Amino acid sequence: MFKYFLNNLAISVSELDPVQNDGDDKQKVIWIIALVAVVIICIVLSQIKFDISGKIKAKKEENAKRKVAKARDDELERLHEIKRKNQRK
């Protein structure tokens, strides 16, 4: 059955007349314009992506610095508390 289908497909394709394309130059211009538009869109999207990833990276670094500073402040507070307790005794 599949072979029959392929034979029919081959026969019908071989019987087709070649398509005359009078607008070849116009079609090439349209494809070039579309390709240039796609390239420009890709460049713009990549710049936006890099800008956003830079902001995310900066935010992560800032959060890491805050975390380190908070841990340092907590440790200093704990040491001061120990010092106050020792001074009371």
Image (cartoon, rainbow, N blue to C red):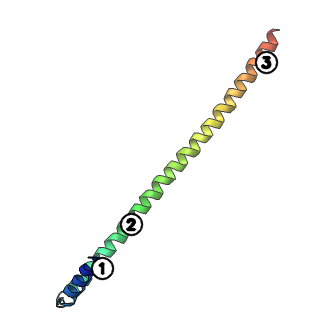
Identify the mark nearer the N-term, 1 or 2: 1
The outermost residue toward the front is 1
Question: In the rendering, at what x and y percent does residue 52 appear?
Answer: 46, 53
Question: In the rendering, at what x and y percent does residue 61 appear?
Answer: 58, 45
Residue pointed to by mark 3: 83
Q: Is residue 6 above or below residue 60?
A: below
Q: Residue at x 53, y 45 (%)?
A: 59
Q: Nearest the camera: 28 or 7?
A: 7
Q: Residue at x 19, y 85 (%)?
A: 12
Question: In the rendering, at what x and y percent does residue 14 appear?
Answer: 22, 90
Q: CA distance from mark 3 to mark 2?
A: 61 Å
Residue 32 is tagged as: 1
Q: Nearer the viewer, mark 3 or mark 2?
A: 2
Q: Is residue 45 above or below residue 72?
A: below
- Report the label total: 3
Within-10-Å neighbours for mark 1: few <14, some 14–19, many 20+: few
Within-10-Å neighbours for mark 3: few <14, some 14–19, many 20+: few
Identify the mark nearer the N-term, 3 or 2: 2
Within-10-Å neighbours for mark 2: few <14, some 14–19, many 20+: few
Residue pointed to by mark 2: 42
Q: CA distance from mark 1 to mark 3?
A: 76 Å
Q: Given contact means CB atoms under 8 Å apart, are the residues at marks 1 and 2 in contact? A: no
> Judging from the image, what secondary structure is the residue with disc 3 in?
helix
Q: Nearest the camera: 81 or 26?
A: 26
Q: The residue under label 3 is which amino acid type? A: Lys
Q: Nearer the viewer, mark 1 or mark 3?
A: 1
Identify the mark nearer the N-term, 1 or 3: 1
